Image: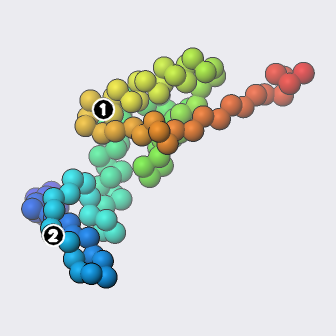
């Protein structure tokens, strides 16, 4: 664990352009492109989301995406609020601006 923490301690980021590199600045998060980053992300999301999850097939975490399913629009709203407030409490943001909602009806609803 100390080795992993040492990799991120004092990490800085620069933006590389044709004009040269920018000044170094601090970055919060995992190293982009690191082979270890996806694994660390999954481990952290597993711990953070444990108390929020109801389980498959109604909730699915994939990479940095979240899929929520519900039987009604109201129960979906409740889930979204629960996840948003739960993630906010852990210092993470749920980008509701990129949120998509899809409605599906069963064959019995079509008759």
- Quadrant where the C terminus lies? top right
Kindly state the secondary structure of the residue where label 1 is placed: helix
Q: Residue furthest right?
A: 111
- Kindly indicate the quadrant of the structure image that contains residue 81: top left
> In the image, which disc is placed on residue 28?
none
What crowding class fits label 2: few (fewer than 14 Cα within 10 Å), some (14-19), or many (20 or more)? Answer: few
Residue with the most extreme front position: 19
* Camera sees residue 11: yes
Percent from the top left, x then y, of residue 79? 48, 24
Question: Could you tell whether 76 is left or right of 9 in the image?
Answer: right
Q: Going 15% across and 69% down the picture, which residue do you hit?
A: 23
Asked if residue 12 is positioned above or below residue 85 in the image, the reply reads below
Answer whether labels 2 and 1 touch (C-beta < 8 Å).
no
Q: Nearer the viewer, residue 99 or 6?
A: 99
Q: Is residue 57 visible?
A: no
Where is mark 1, residue-wise? Answer: 88
Instruction: Answer few, some or many: residues within 10 Å of disc 1's Cα (few below 14, many 20 plus, some between 14 and 19).
Output: few
Q: Which mark is residue 23?
A: 2
> Separation of disc 2 and disc 1 at Cα?
30 Å
Closer to the chain start, of discs 2 and 1, is: 2
* Residue 2 position in % (x across, y down): 10, 59
Foreground of the two, 19 or 60 = 19
Number of marks: 2
Q: Quadrant of the N terminus?
A: bottom left
Residue 88 image offset from top left, x and y in percent:
30, 32
Is 78 displayed left or right of 49 in the figure? right
Please tell me which residue is depicted at 68% across the width and 31% down the height of the picture: 103
Please, is residue 17 above or below residue 44 in the view? below
Quadrant housing residue 50: top left
Write the residue at 29% across / 55% down.
40
Element type at mark 2: loop
């Amino acid at each position: 664990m100390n080795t992993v923490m040492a990799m991120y301690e004092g990490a800085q980021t620069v933006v590389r352009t044709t004009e040269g590199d920018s000044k170094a600045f601090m970055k919060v998060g995992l190293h982009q492109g690191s082979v270890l980053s996806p694994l660390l992300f999954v481990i952290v999301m597993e711990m953070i989301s444990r108390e929020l999850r109801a389980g498959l097939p109604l909730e699915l975490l994939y990479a940095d995406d979240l899929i929520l399913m519900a039987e009604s629009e109201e129960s979906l709203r409740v889930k979204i609020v629960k996840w948003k407030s739960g993630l906010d409490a852990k210092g993470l943001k749920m980008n509701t601006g990129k949120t998509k909602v899809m409605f599906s009806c069963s064959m019995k609803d079509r008759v």
